[in-house]
Amino acid sequence: MLKIGLVFMGSLLSLIFNCYGQSNYMSSGYISLIIKGASPHDLKNLEVDGPFMSDPLQGDRPVTFRSVNDSTLLLSEFTFGPASVFFRINGRYLSTILLPNETNVINLHVTDSANFDLDYHGSYKEIFDNSGLQEKLIMKMFSYKPRVKKEKAKFASEKEFTEVKMLHLNQMKDSLLKNTPSQFLRNYYSKLIETFQITPLLKDYRTSLLNYYKMLGIDDKKEINLPVRTRSYYDNLITSGYLDSLSLLPSGYFDLLLTIQKDTLLELPDILKTGPAVFTKSLKKTFKYLSQDDHNLFYDMMAASAYINAINQGQQLSDQNLYDIIAYFKNKQLSSYILHRSAISLLNQKKKNGEVFFLPFEKENDDVLNNILEKYKGKVLLVDFWATWCGPCLAASLAIEKVKKRFENRDDIKFIYLTDETSDRNRFYELTEVLKGEHYYLYKNQFEAIKKKYNFEAIPSYVVFDKNGNMSQASTAPDNLEEVAKTWIESVL
């Protein structure tokens, strides 16, 4: 009897926790993560790489742990919904989910200079304690090869293609998740895999289809049948699972929303001009199979992401826009978050910062590099070509931060960041607070002219100049960036 009672109580507590957690999924507020050492000595030999964070209305971005005192580090950011966070401590990959208005603590116990234990206190301890499993899962996901049948190579419709891709997706999940230690982790990892795999299918249908044919050894374009894509393309890809708040957890969720929003096939209107009701009505032309209700998780998050994207592009919300947001969204924490992002964007644009230069040159002037180099004559420059949407650029920033630390006591070295109009304006301003250096937001033609000068076809790319403004090194995404960049700089000092 006692055993039955304990089981019942455990189930009840689990239900209560899940209800509370999911209610927090739709809240806004500050997430907090504290790393606390038993003594000041514990943090001295601690190397923290990252962290990176994403939430349902912002994509992956670098954030920072701030030093509170000799034995305490703090990460605190304002978010809507659950924030996915990952970082490394002395090379060990760590990941968790942080909820608004909750404090999570990692107690650090150092045994010697090479070994340490981490004791996590927070809602998603299970995710944190299985961080290594998640890292392996992500690596296996990108190297996974589906079982394919050549007789199914040529598709008569886009529906056939998505059916096969979803079959492969389910096979991948069955293969990678078969030894997952709990049902919660299986559900979470399943949604993580799904989000990462579906987004590319939505971003570029043609490339996805051609890549599938190529995998089968069919490379002759004369043989390839490319069925016309219609709205029904979404039927197998965006399912009722996106009405569940669990869909908010994966780090790729915001990118998925933006991908759908930017799909010209859907002909979604400008939400700033039409308002959220018309936007949702247009959305339902494609996704009516999900729900006829104007207010469900997917529709509301799509409308919210449309506002956030406009704000990130530097557009100011009118009084009518503000009214629409307040009147339309039933979840007032969601509408408050959108207004908060708008206010932050206005502050960022008005901020005067001697290290941030937003469109500083006339658009007609393609040759702006000489103007930039002239300003830093007498100093060694490492110029970083990047963009806010470029995941590899942000990942590489961790290596560049270590290079900065190596030369932090020298005043004859400058780190220059160049990006262009393809970067979200608001996100650009926010990232300049994290990526310390001097930042230039250029017109696209200016950025492309500089890339062409150094034969860069992709980013991240890097150029090192000596103190006379002469190019010493130029490279795109070099291996072992930290050591390579240090060598580049030392060679011209």
Image (spheres, rainbow, N blue to C red):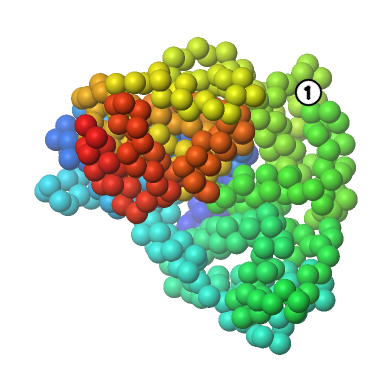
Q: Is residue 161 left or right of residue 437?
A: right
Spot occupied by residue 411 in the image (x, y as percentages of width and height): 25, 21
* Residue in the image at 60% along x and 61% along y: 197
Closest to the observer: 309 or 3? 309
With respect to residue 221, does 455 lie above or below? above
Q: Is residue 122 visible?
A: no
What residue would you read off at disc 1?
Answer: 321
Spot occupied by residue 429 in the image (x, y as percentages of width and height): 52, 25
Spot occupied by residue 177 in the image (x, y as percentages of width and height): 49, 70
Residue located farthest toward the bottom when viewing the structure as drawn? 151
Q: Is residue 273 left or right of residue 304?
A: right
Residue 401 figure quarter = top left
Q: Secondary structure at mark 1?
A: helix
With respect to residue 190, does 428 lie above or below? above
* Residue in the image at 72% along x and 61% along y: 205
Residue 49 figure quarter = top left
Spot occupied by residue 41 in the image (x, y as percentages of width and height): 14, 35
Identify residue type, mark 1: Asn
* Residue in the image at 46% along x and 25% along y: 370
With respect to residue 242, does 102 lie above or below? above
Q: Is residue 160 left or right of residue 165?
A: right
State the quadrant of the C terminus: top left
